[in-house]
Amino acid sequence: MGIEPGRLHFSWISSAESTKFAKVAQEVSDKVKALGPNDHFAKKELKVA
Amino acid sequence: MKCIKIDKNEWAGGLEAAASTYRLFGPVKEDEFYEFKALEEGRAPDAAAMAVRNTRTSPRSVVYPQAEVLFEYTTDERDPDAHVMKEPEREEKPRAAIGIRPCDAYSFVLVRNNFESPEYQDVYWLRNYEETTFIGQACHDPCSTCFCTTAGCGPFHEEGLDVLLADAGDHYAAKVLTDKGETFMKAAGWGDEIDFPDEEWEGWKTAAGEKIVSEVPTDRLADIDTLALHDADFWDDVAFSCINCGTCTYLCPTCWCFDIQDENKGREGIRYRCWDSCMFPIFTLHGSGHNPRDAKTQRVRQRFMHKLKYFVDRYEAGIQCVGCGRCVQHCPVNIDIRKVCNLMNSFGETESCSVA
Amino acid sequence: MIAYTDKIQEIARRLLKDCKVETVIGFRKGSVPMMNEPCFITSADAADGLVWDGNCGINLANYLTNRKEKIAVFAKGCDSRNIANHIIENKIDREQLYIVGVPCQGMIEKRRIRQMAPGEITEATEDGDEIRVKGRDFEEVYNRDEALQKNCAVCVHRNPVIHDEMVADEVEEQTDVDRFADVREIEAMSPEERRVFFRKLLEPCIRCYACRNACPLCYCPTCFVDESQPQWVGKSQNPTDIWTFHFLRAYHCAGRCTDCGACERACPVGINMRLLTKKLNKDAFDQWGWEAGLNLEERPPLDTYRPNDPEEFIK
Ligand code: SF4
Ligand code: SF4
Ligand code: SF4
Ligand code: SF4
């Protein structure tokens, strides 16, 4: 589709792995923040065409 | 007959000149097909484009865009215009539809019946329509699916046009029909007035008419009982293959139905209208969850009854179809309005009405 | 393939006369060149109207959804796979169907022939490997293979996978085709190039939903694009809304699409939205060796769990 690498993440985290969850969530949000706002697949303006 | 001679060498230059006062629309090549859309700055339709008879999508959107903002608003109190419904800014230049075919131009005359009545005037449609100049092009060589001559117009039909061009080899003979047309010709700098032989023009017209191989009979439609036709036994057969897409209604120049939608983002919002189609199940879905046209057959019947019966009865302006043949050519499952019109028009004439 | 027509009529006549089925779903001759219209018949006398040739590209599985009666349906390779899919997804019972298999040699892409012809085609006839077209002042002959639908040209399941009877002997399957060359080309692009590519691909879309409605997989009573509570997608021509429709629809077809080509064939503006579903077909094939609708026994990968799932994308 053309989503930049690094914007989409997948992980297996068991419900028992709370520290892993926190760590992964932190990593994901850091990486996505570094990429900046998603310009391509978000409706930025109210436009009809 | 007075005509303006437009030398083909002066075609592009004239349109370029006109583009300073008009926004030009015309047939434009998109990959393999032609669309009728805004011409890029300084890009006049070339010979190949002018030879295209039916653009894939109709020129309907010149006057009636597929989606059009009606108003915008903000609820941000810091904005002096907060809570005011404002019209979006409009382009200043009026529009001109270049090389529009006579059937397509005539479609606006039919559609006007819907957007302008003594009780209601649709300002958005009317304003766009009134400001548009229609520079038509006669069809010397109609398609096999064209049935304009039995659908109220024809390859040289003038109603709805401001200028009618006829291709005369190295030049166009332009018949100026209205003041609006004259203004456009001046803006394009085309003024070489000639005396065009009437017989030649009439000869072209007859020759083009003779090339029309498709027709629809409409003579009995008005007199047939509406309810009986509504309950005719052929509808299930007609509708079976239909997939209820929007192809026929979205390509059709005479379809006019729309939906109204609101969208907002933060404190800003717009209300727009966009084309809708009687073929879509949600078109008639009530808030209660009830859908009066829940079944496919009902929707297909609606399209044909509207075009070929209700419209006929209500406006006395013929059928709501100009015979462009787009739906015939592009329906993915080959539902053919010519066949259906035949069935409807001959309803009750003989005992059996099943499709061959 | 013309030769099938007589056999098809004969089978339909027999099934209806013997009350084996109540309805027969097939094709009748179209009103414009290179088009046939799906139709149903309920009496043996009407069987004369049935036809078969290279213009039967519409997927007839689409006409079976939620039907209640006993039906005979003519099915090409891809149709039969979509029928299998329908049975697996409980949209119709196997017992309700009498499937008449039609070995297929590929369907004709009308647009391609129209482009090849020097003028408007007013008549087209198929004759073995040739297609003869006529216009007002020309006559041309094209090779059938040059004019096949893109999906048919690389199809490896031309013979119906389930059937109660066959119209003719099986045809030879194609083995030397490169099915996913187009997908690989897109995979090789950078994300930015891909985004631009898809933007251009989908730009002409008028949201008529012919692609969705021609697809046997798209049987949801209310499609997500039509939902209003909540409304997932705007209804204007905003490109983001158009992408949302196409990308999400493609995902809903993952592991189910048979690449029958009905969607692309139906599109009035010639968009090859199959590139989206094909990528998912390729993934399903690469990951699990899965091709949709090949039999009634195996569950599709997206509704089963297997411990040996590669899951390479998950870290
Ligand atoms: S008649 Fe044809 S084009 Fe119209 S909704 Fe039905 S299938 Fe689509
Ligand atoms: S109904 Fe069909 S033929 Fe008639 S104007 Fe509309 S698209 Fe053209
Ligand atoms: S997505 Fe297209 S190719 Fe795939 S099954 Fe549906 S119609 Fe056929
Ligand atoms: S059929 Fe074509 S135009 Fe219609 S919604 Fe699908 S891609 Fe868009």
Image (spheres, coloured by chain):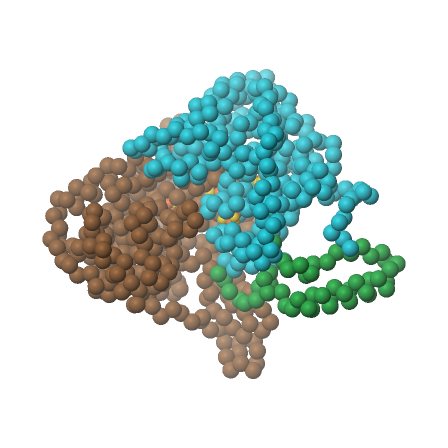
Which residue is painted at 47% across and 33% down in the image?
C146
Q: Colour of chain C?
A: cyan
The chain coloured brown is B
Quarter containing ligand 3? top right
Chain shown green: that is A
Determine whether B23 is above or below C136 in the image: below
Considering depth in this image, is B87 or B119 the residue closer to the camera?
A: B87
Task: Name the side, left or right, on which B85 lies relative to A18.
Answer: left
Relative height, residue C109 to residue C45 (above, below): below
Q: Position of residue C92 (x, y in %)?
A: 66, 34
- Residues A35 and B237: in front is A35
Q: Residue at x 76, y 53 (%)?
A: C314
At x 50%, y 62%, the residue is: A48
Please state if C74 lies on the left or on the right of C308 as rendered.
Answer: left
Residue C206 location (% of width, % of height): 48, 52
Q: Give how far across and how far down residue C290 sits, in percent.
A: 70, 38
